Image (tube, rainbow, N blue to C red):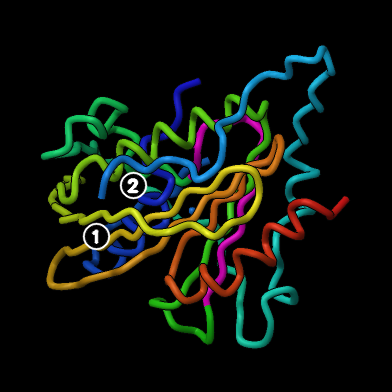
Amino acid sequence: MRLSTTTALGLSILTVLALTGCSTSPQSSDAPAASSATPAHRSGNGAKAPAPLSSAKLSKRLLDAGDLGEGYTRKAAPALRHDDVSVIGCPALAKLGGATATGSSLSFPRKAKASFTYAGSSSSEVSEELYSDSATKLSTGIGEIFDAMVSCSSYQVASGNTVIDIGTRKTTAPNLGDEQWSQLLTYSAGGQRSVVKQTAIRTGNVLLVVSGSPALVDTHIAKALHKAQTAR
C-alpha cells in the first residue's frame, strides 16, 4: 500500500502555510527511525487475525474535548493546498512522492481524525489520527514514512511560491503498545518557526498517530492510546 509521504507534514505544513499567509483551497493531521518493539508478522499458528475496524468505529475511539480537559476546542478539518509540492534535499522522502507532502492523512482506507487547539492559541495544537489494517501493513507503512522523514536531518518542501525549511530528529518514543515511533520536526518559512512532535503507536490492528505541540503530545499520548484500545 502506498501511503501519503508525510502525515506529520499534513498538520505542520498547513500550520506554517497559514502563518506565512499562503492561500489554501478546500479538499475532500537522527538515524532512520526504527520501532522500539518487534515488527509485526503474520500469525504463524493458524489463528485468524482480527478484522480491521471500520472508520465509524475508529471515530468513536478518538479523544474529544472532554477527554482532553478544560481549555481545548475542536478544530474544523483544515483546508488543503492544490499547489504542486516537491521535496528538495531528501531523496528518500522525495521518492515516496513529493506531490502528497501536504496530505492530511495516511492512505489506509479505514481512518478517523480529530484536531484541537488549546486555550485558543494557534501554536498549541494537537491532532490525533487512528488507522486500522493488518498489523503487518500498519507496521510496514508507518515505518517506511518515519524512516524516510528522519533519513535527512534537514531538507526543504516547496509548495507554490513557498519554500519551507524542515529539520527532523528522532526522539525516544514512550514504551506503549506493540510498536512505537517518535520524531521532532522544526519548520521555518517566511520568518515563522514551528516545532512539532509526532508519535505513532501500533497496538494490534490499530495505529495511533498524535502530532502537535511537543508538550501536548507527551501529555495526551497515553490517554489517546487507552481510548483507542478500549472504546467500543
Report the amino acid beneath label 1. Cys
Q: Residue at x 45, y 35 (%)?
A: 143
Residue 22: numbered disc = 1
Say which mark, if any, is on residue 81: 2
Point out residue 49 in the picture as x, y percentages from the top left corner. Answer: 79, 23
Q: Nearer the viewer, residue 42 or 79?
A: 42
Q: Judge whether residue 113 is colored magenta.
A: yes
Point out the tag, 2 or 1, that comes first from the N-terminus.
1
At label 2, which amino acid type do we have?
Answer: Arg
* Whole-percent x, y for residue 195 in the image: 31, 68
Write down the region rendered in magenta.
105-117
Residue in the picture at 25% in, 63% down: 186
What number of labels is visible? 2
Quarter of the rendering containing residue 44: top right
Q: Is residue 172 above or below residue 152?
A: below
Is 136 or 127 nearer to us in this picture?
136
Is 74 rendered above or below residue 33?
below
- Name which quarter of the figure residue 12 lies in: bottom left
Residue 194 numbered tag:
none
Whole-percent x and y of residue 182?
44, 54
Element type at marker 1? Answer: loop
Label pair 2/1, CB-CB below 8 angstroms: yes
What is the CA distance from the residue labelled 2 to the residue labelled 1? 9 Å
Local SS, label 2: loop
Direction from residue 80 to residue 41 in the image, left or right: right
Identified at 51% across, 74% down, the residue is 216
